[in-house]
Structure formats: structure tokens, C-alpha cells
Amino acid sequence: MNIQNLTIDTIHEGLINKEFSCTELTKAFLEKAKKENERLNIYITITEKEALETAAHVDEKIARGESISGLEGIPCSIKDLINTKGIRSTSGSAILSDFVSPYDATVVQKLRDAGMIMIGKTNLDEFACGGSTEYSFVGPTRNPHNERYTAGGSSGGSAAAVAAGTCLYALGTDTGGSIRQPASFCGVPALKVTYGRVSRSGVTAMASSLDTVGPFAHSCRDIAHVMNTIAGSDPEDSTTPEVVVPNYLHSLDESIKGLTIGIPKEYFDDGIDEEVKESVHNAIKQLEKQGATVKEVSLPMTKYAIAVYYIVMPAELSANLARFDAIRFGTKPDHTGESLEEYYLNARGEGFGDEVKRRIMMGTYVLSAGYYDAYYKKAQKVRTAIIEEFNTVFQEVDVLIGPTVPTPAFKLGEKLDDPLQMYLVDSLTVPMNIAGLPALNVPCGSTKKGLPIGMQIIGPQFSEAQLLTIGHTYETHS
Ligand code: GLN
């Protein structure tokens, strides 16, 4: 069967009208996933058996004449940082290469209850630390638009899984840009949610005050479908407040007339690629045609965001990764050594990659006695100033729009020798993690070389529905 150009709605219609069975559909997506996986290295594990079993259940239900829900029978992929019961969940690390999770993350449980067909677990940088998947223990995912380029990271596998047409939607995580940056590089819409909008229970923690889980899909409409299932408070995650979850599909077609879009001038300065600037400006013009007004604003604190992030994130990461000691969690080292200390050193020395080790060292340094005040405490103060700056600007404008990433995708290997260059890729995405704000990547063109460009629509906390309305308006009018 032809699986191109399907949407969540058209599959749903096709299933209930018996145009195809869920098993046929799933087989077609599995075949595509295997083929693209050979070319692009998207998946760490393809979950063929589970996918076909669930598909058979959906077919039985339809045969019995029972109704099925909107996401039932829809093929999807899950980042391997998100734990799945009975299925290997590696977090992209050699230290968890044979870890099988004893339980499902809340988001996975919700999607299972909704009848998802999980095609596989996607590739990522080790423990989500990176921006190219080159730090994954199974090697990098390649960009579906050009195999010599990175798919981005850390959720590069999830972005490529959707962009290459191996599933309808995918889940990723975003701590400093790991959903939006790969989405921008691969040319798919994707949403980084408000901190606390989606449960993180069962998701391997990177930096707990920054981590979020969110969807990639082929359209804002399909993202809205997924949000309707995964958003909301969870008793297993105390950072998910009881804020009402709107129906994200209902507001999609609302008019954007009268909306004020802020254009932060720092997001268009000299460091930003010319083709990226042009595409984002053109997209904003399209939104003006639909009735939005535009206002230039300034966010001078933007330049401090990376510095704050590379103190707060490693501090939290070093604490979170302490649990991987190869006693409770983690693969036993080849040489156990003579003492407990030697055991730890061997296990963590063998199990973690260089970038993760670098961050553990940075994190323990900034938290150590004597440096805590100079680094960690100071970073927290600047964090507060960044939050206040956003609060002030959102009194003047409804949303902000700028490029998601300063450049299109870079070549594989290009930034491997210089971690700082890799860190700077996140300059426009980390501010929203620092402030806990939602931001939506929407593809808005491509370079002369054919690499996708993305814009990011940023809003106040819990404004996801509005961001999706704007994204949907752009998709349907451009
Ligand atoms: N690229 C960023 C980093 O390396 C973001 C990671 C993320 O969002 N998980 O930390």
C-alpha cells in the first residue's frame, strides 16, 4: 500500500472504512522503517513483533464493530531515552546497552492506552547530551534530505523517523533544543512544551529543571492530536501542575487576526545565516497577511543563555547520572577491579562516552565547595533575569518568532573536534528551556542546497494551543 502523504485523520478514516487493515498498514511502515534505517540509522531497536501484535488487536476490534480512538492504529516512534516496558531502552549509552525497562514512562502508557503502533525506539546522543546524534553509542543518524549532513540532536532519530516517512509521529525530549533543532534540520514541525505540561515520569533524566517531552509530526494538526493524549498532570511527576488541558484540535482553525508577533532583534543579528533570516522573515510576512501585526522587540539577555545553560545543565546531569554505577543500573565492567572504587571507575569509565564524561566533570566542578557560589548560584540569578525579561516582553506581544537554529544542518563530523561550536548551535533554543516556555518549530523553506529551515514560535507558559493555531495557519496559507 502507498503510505506517502497519510495523516492521522486519513488513516483513521481508512481503518474504520476498511480501506486497509491495521496489519497491512503496520507492515508497510515496518518495511519503510527497515529500509530507511539502513540508509539513515534512525532506530536503535525496531519493535516489529510488538507493532504487529498491537495491529492485530486493532483489526480484531474493528472486525467486532467496536469504535477506535483517533490515535488507535497510528504508527509512531519513541526516543530511546523514554522507557518502554519489556523493550530495550538504552538512552543512547553503552552503559545501558542491554537495559530492559521494568515499566512504561507515563507518556508511553498513555499512548499505549490510546492504541499506538510503536514502530521502534529512535537514536539519540548519549543521555540526550549533544546536537547531532554523533555521541550515540550506535553512531549518528543521517539527515534524510542529505546523508552527508546531521539530522540534528539529541532527538535526531525521532526527527528523521518522521521526515523519512517511517511513522506518523514521534516523541522526543528537549532540554536545550533537542526537539526543535533536529526538527528544524529535518524539516518537520515539532513542539517543545511548557515545563511540566507533559509528564517526565519514566524518562531518563538529563537536567531535571529543564527536561521536557514533546511530539514531532508531519503537521501541526497531527501534533495537536498527540498533545491531546500526552498532555496533563501526572501523580508520578510532581512538576506537572493541574492546569486545564485544552482540546488542541478545537482551536486550530481560529483566526490570528489581531495577534501581535514580537520579532526579537537579537534573533536576527550577524551570527545568523542569511538564507535562514530571509526564510523566517518571509514566513512572518505570510502571517501578517493573515491579520497578525508585527513589532520589533529586544531580548538583550539572550547572549547569556548558553553560559547559564552550560552551568545548570551539567550540574543537574552530574547528579542524575550518579545512579549509573553498574550495581543498580548499568552494564558490569569487563574488569571489576580490587575495590568498590575501582569497580565504579571501571564501570563508568567504560560505560560513558567522552562528551558525557566532560559534562559530569563540568557539573561536579560547578557544584563543588568554593565554586558553587561563583558558578551555580550566579547562573541561577541570571536564569531569573532571563525569565523576567520574557515575562516583560509577553506583556507587549502575544508570541515571539525567530529562527529555531542560527544555521541549517551542518555536515557530519564538522563540529566533533570543537565542543564549543556544538554548544553554540543551541543559542536560540536554550532560552526557552531556561524560562520553561513552549516553542514550536515550523518548517519555512529550504536553502539553495536543499536543506530545511525552521522558524520557532515562542509563547508564554501553557500557550501551546495558540502556537499550534499559528503554525497551522502558516501551513495552510503558505
Ligand atoms: N544540544 C543540547 C545539549 O547538548 C541540547 C540537549 C537536549 O535538549 N537534550 O545539551
Image (cartoon, grey):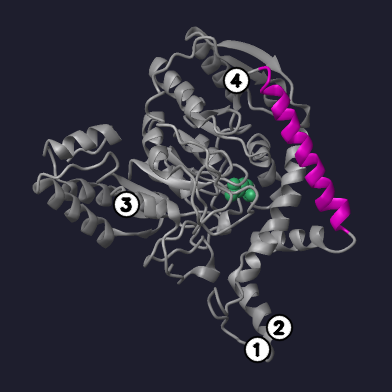
Q: Based on the picture, tell me whether residue 382 belongs to the magenta stretch.
A: yes
Is 6 positioned to the left or the right of 313 in the image?
left
The residue to which callout 2 is attached is 341
Nearer mark to the viewer, of 3 and 1: 3
Q: Based on the picture, tell me whether residue 431 belongs to the magenta stretch.
A: no
First in residue order: circle 1 vs circle 4: 1
Contact, mark 3 vs mark 4 (Cβ under 8 Å): no
**Cα distance in 3D space between marks 2 and 1:** 8 Å
Nearer mark to the viewer, of 2 and 1: 2
Nearer mark to the viewer, of 1 and 4: 4
Mark 3 is surrounded, within 10 Å at the Cα level, by few (under 14), some (14 to 19) or many (20 or more) other residues, namely: few
First in residue order: circle 3 vs circle 1: 3
Residue 88 visible in rendering:
yes
Seen from the viewer's position, the closer of residues 315 and 129 is 315
Name which residue type carries label 4: Asp
The residue to which callout 1 is attached is 337
**Is the magenta region chiefly helix, strand or loop?**
helix
The residue to which callout 3 is attached is 113
Residue 231: percent from left, percent from top: 45, 42
Mark 1 is surrounded, within 10 Å at the Cα level, by few (under 14), some (14 to 19) or many (20 or more) other residues, namely: some
Seen from the viewer's position, the closer of residues 274 and 263 is 263
Residue at figure coordinates x 46%, y 24% from the top left: 471
**Cα distance in 3D space between marks 2 and 3:** 44 Å
Contact, mark 2 vs mark 3 (Cβ under 8 Å): no
Residue at figure coordinates x 69%, y 62% from the top left: 318
Contact, mark 2 vs mark 1 (Cβ under 8 Å): yes
Nearer mark to the viewer, of 2 and 4: 4
Name which residue type carries label 2: Glu
The residue to which callout 4 is attached is 398
Q: Is residue 151 above or below residue 386?
A: below
First in residue order: circle 2 vs circle 4: 2
